[in-house]
Amino acid sequence: MQDFTDFFWTSPEGLPLHARDYAPREKAQKLPVICIHGLTRNARDFEDLAPRLAAEGRRVLAVDVRGRGLSARDPNPMNYHPGTYAADILALLEAAKIEKAVFIGTSMGGLITMVLTSIMPEAIAAAVLNDVGPELSPIGLARIAGYAGLASRFETWDEAVAYARAINEAAFPGYGPDDWDVFARRLFDEKDGAFVLAYDPDISAPIKAAAEAAAKTQAEGGQALAPPDMYPLFRALAKDRPLLLVRGGISDLIDPAIAERMRAAAPHMAYAEVPGVGHAPMLTEPEAWAAIEKLLETAS
């Protein structure tokens, strides 16, 4: 029995979008929680975390970012970037009549949260950045770029599970066969007798375009443009609100040096590390959940 209802809204240009809507388990009027997943994932990533949050007396909206899950695919793949996604979240807040919420962002979801800080900071009461920050390790970025938008269809369930494991085993070395079966069910949909990843392969188009532009510039003897400086957005997110960084202990996207720089830039930010897990924790691990519970105590 599912413990959520489907919530649909439309993007600023009319694209149908979807979130899982978990009702609070008690009548306490606490701030709702918006959960935003990573690049190739969807709302199912929060299927264990969201009920816990709802049990704390909070409405939880676990978003399918455009191009993922039950949200529509964008006919213009170049729209797949955090600025567009942030505008979609603002439309969600309006449709759901939410003025302020706690934001939990995994990977790309954390970047979207930082962008939101520059658009509507008053909507963010507190935030959790799950294994993401204003700078990212090129090692982890290269790994993600290596599989995003590639293989997407498998004829048997065993093949789908094997793919999920091959891509993610380094991040979850303690998982067994049952864990990988559950993990794969979050990633795949069954369609026309086969199993397909629950995202538009074209979500990687802006990433590939940026890489091709950089390669062309270098080949012509020019200097590639530096990535945008996200630290101002990060500092703004950390200012005057509770902020928590959760890091996977063996993450290849937020390495220890990056985590230390983030903590230096935001001295009041809370920090939790999940041992033996890479990018990205599921946030139900004891270390992560205890830190989230503590943050929620400050966000009534």
Image (cartoon, grey):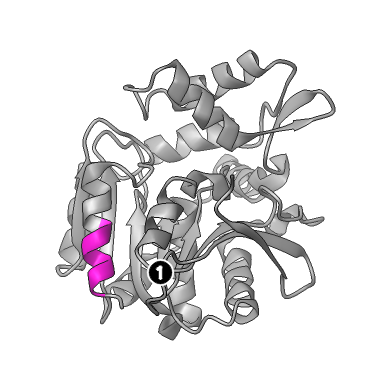
Q: Quadrant of residue 240?
A: bottom left
User: x, y (%) of residue 122?
Assistant: 42, 85
Q: Nearer the viewer, residue 152 or 274?
A: 274
* Residue for point 60% across, 64% down: 85
Compared with 90, 34 (above or below) is: above
Residue shown at 23%/37% (left/top)?
Answer: 249
Majority SS type along the magenta span = helix
Instruction: Point out the image quarter for the N terminus.
Output: top right
From this viewpoint, is residue 258 visible? no
Lateral position of residue 180 relative to residue 241, left or right: right
**Residue 115 image position (x, y, % from top left):** 48, 70
Instruction: Tell which residue pokes out farthest to the right in this image.
Output: 192
Residue 12 vs 270, above or below: the answer is below
Q: Residues within 10 Å of mark 1 (few under 14, many from 20)?
A: few
| Disc 1 target residue | 26
Residues in magenta? 292-298
Residue at the spot 48% in from the left edge and 82% down from the top edge: 120
Amino acid on which disc 1 is placed: Glu
**Image quadrant of residue 50?**
bottom left
Left or right of residue 250, residue 194 in this image: right
Residue 228 pos. (x, y %): 45, 63
- The residue nearer to you, when weighing 168 against 139, is 168
Q: Position of residue 206 (x, y in %)?
A: 64, 51
- Confirm whether the magenta stretch covers residue 247: no
- The secondary structure type at the circle numbered 1 is loop
Query: In the displayed structure, would residue 17 be above or below residue 73?
Result: below
Question: On the picture, is 242 further left or further right than 214?
Answer: left
